[in-house]
Amino acid sequence: MSAAPLVSLRDVSVRYGPATPRVLGHVTLDLMAGDRLAVIGESGSGKSTLALALAGLLPKGAAAEGRIAWPGLGEKPLPGRDIGIVYQDPSGSLDPVMRIGDQVAEVVAAHAAGPTDRSPREQAVELLARVELPDPANLARSYPHQLSGGQRQRVALALALAGRPRVLVADEATSALDPVVQSRLVGLIGRLCDEEGLALVFVTHDIALAASLASRLAVVYAGRLVEIGPRGRVLAHPRHPYTRALMAAHLGLDRPPGGRLATVEGSPPDLASPPPGCRFAPRCSLAVAGCTSGDPPWYGEPDDGAACVFAERLAP
């Protein structure tokens, strides 16, 4: 018998208020133990909303439809204990008037499973060392403003791990960092997930960064899940034109100098009045009349497919 998923979404839609448009619509997916799922899409596509739904952290007033369950966790997850989150801006999750060590120790103490021979403060210093911060005992006495952006993000990662969660959500956690620091942090996240056996939800707009870390890719456009599948299959044989466009727009190191960088022409639709049918149709070079007559069919399996009338033709 296969293990129960840690998180299960079935036909989930989200509105930020009862009279507001859906910012996420009709998503079905499972997150298994040890999974590495990257959620990719443009700004405003619904990536962060999907991550918050998975984590059970939709804000007060958000109206969720469909079924969100956590069968592998046994109950609705407790933030910090079951699911750790690293946000884009670490300054928003760090108290500016508390020393770093005290902040991490506070989370350790709050989620302690029982007595231990090490104090929360000692465990905090160990966590700072695990996220590869230099001289962790000394750094623990620092305040957030005394650290660099990359160091603050590593502290945020230590906070996310302090409760020993089973799922780690990184919501655009690297987007504010320079490429070198970004690459190091992504490598660190991958290593820690392996060591702790964590399932990872990695939210990003960078398909290359996602590919370097995730085992599965989920592509979101205008509040809809348009493609999901194993990393190798999605990169080698994308089945949705939007996924293909994102890959074409990536500036890789192997791209020859000169020439025009591919772009996705147009802009995402206004979710208050989305176009009929496929929401990507107004920007899609393959669109035909039938693309605007109804929601596109899903081709493939729930965990390996795409929502497009051309998905079968684009499949290998």
Image (cartoon, grey):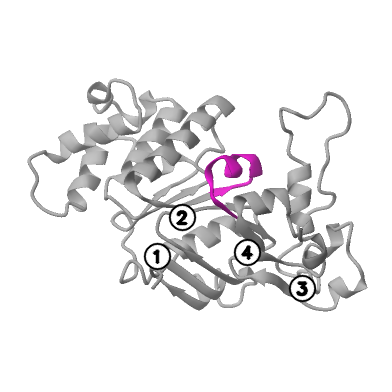
Q: Quick one: label 1, few (<14), some, or many (20+) residues within 10 Å? A: many
The residue that mark 1 highlights is 6
Type of amino acid under label 4: Asp
* Amino acid beneath label 1: Leu
The quarter of the picture where residue 305 lies is bottom right
Q: How far apart are the alpha carbons under marks 1 and 3? A: 29 Å
Q: N-terminal of the two: label 1 or label 4? A: 1
The residue closer to the viewer here, 288 or 124, is 288
Q: Secondary structure at mark 4?
A: strand
Magenta-drawn segment: 203-217
Q: Disc 1 to disc 4, how far (Cα)?
A: 18 Å
Where 18 sits versus 315, above or below?
below
Quadrant (top left, top right, bottom left, bottom right) of the N terminus? bottom left
In three-dimensional space, the C-alpha distance between marks 2 and 4, rounded to whole angstroms, equals 14 Å
Instruction: Find residue 194 and report its horizontal and vertical position in percent.
Output: 39, 44
Q: Are marks 2 and 4 in contact (CB under 8 Å)?
A: no
Helix, strand or loop at disc 1?
loop
Please give the residue where the numbered disc 4 appears in the rendered image: 304
> Count the marks: how many?
4
Mark 3 crowdedness (10 Å alpha carbons): few <14, some 14-19, many ≥20: some
Give the residue at x 53% y 31%.
Answer: 183
Residues at marks 3 and 4 touching, judged by CB atoms closer than 8 Å:
no
**Residue visible at 79% across and 53% down?**
267
Q: Where is 64 relative to 158, above or below?
A: below
Q: Residues within 10 Å of mark 2 (few under 14, many from 20)?
A: many
Q: Position of residue 84 (x, y in %)?
A: 36, 51
Give the amino acid at mark 2. Asp
Please tell me whether residue 282 is drawn above or below residue 258 in the rendered image.
below
Q: Which of the two discs, 1 and 3, labels the residue nearer the N terminus? A: 1
Q: Position of residue 26 (x, y in %)?
A: 61, 74
